[in-house]
Image (spheres, grey):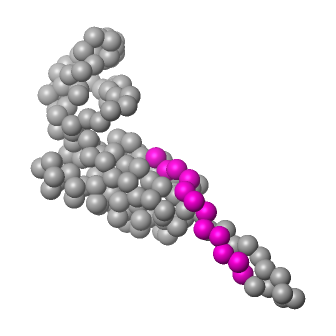
Amino acid sequence: MELIKWESYFMKKGGRRHDDVYAFSRYIPMSVDKARKLIDQIRWRSYEETLMILELMPYRTCYPIFKLIYSAAANASHNKRFKKADLVIVKAEVNKGATMKKLKPRARGRSYMIKRPTCHINLIVRDMSYFADFRNFMRGLSKSDQIKVVRGLQSELFYITD
């Protein structure tokens, strides 16, 4: 039986969850668009799969993102005793940072502005082992029953995932 993508239904608006680990990286010297190109490919993937993807991509922007994900996983395993194999990147967003500006001397005493963009990356990693029993229960249901269960949890018992 095929499972529906129900994890996104349980993204809590505002507040922090106890099974989430947060990592922030600020003022990374790269363009927002270049970072978003990579972040879009690793969202909702497991930790191990993400590391493989980032190691094999030929872009310069992979290394700072790789370091951030590795740091988030290290925090999860040390602070909250999560297994790295159960971690999934739930939310990853890239925001524009300050632009570093330098003046480059040119001919005849003129100068040109060099603008170096920076970005901020916010990452949320979640331990999905909490949802293992729920997944097994959902596998036995038909697709329409799965949707009913998810909608029921959304409307009545949203706090069970907190």
Residue at the bottom extreme, as displayed: 108
Residue 8 found in image quarter: top left
Q: Any magenta on residue 97?
A: yes
Residue 147 found in image quarter: top left
Quarter of the picture containing the C terminus is top left
Prevailing SS of the magenta stretch:
strand
Residue 5 found in image quarter: top left
Q: Is residue 141 visible?
A: yes
Residue at the right extreme, as displayed: 108
Q: Is residue 84 visible?
A: no
Camera-side residue of 89 and 56: 89
Q: Position of residue 143 (x, y in %)?
A: 32, 17
In the rendered view, does 160 fall on the left or right side of 147?
left
**What's the residue at 20%, 45% (across, down)?**
86
For residue 37, above or below residue 12: below
Q: Position of residue 106 (x, y in %)?
A: 80, 85
For residue 145, above or below residue 64: above
**What's the residue at 52%, 50% (across, down)?**
95
Camera-side residue of 116 and 38: 116
Quarter of the picture containing the N terminus is top left
Segment colored magenta? 93-104
**What's the residue at 28%, 11% (across, down)?**
156
Camera-side residue of 155 and 138: 155
In the rendered view, does 52 fall on the left or right side of 133?
right
**What's the residue at 18%, 25% (across, down)?**
134
Q: Any magenta on residue 57?
A: no
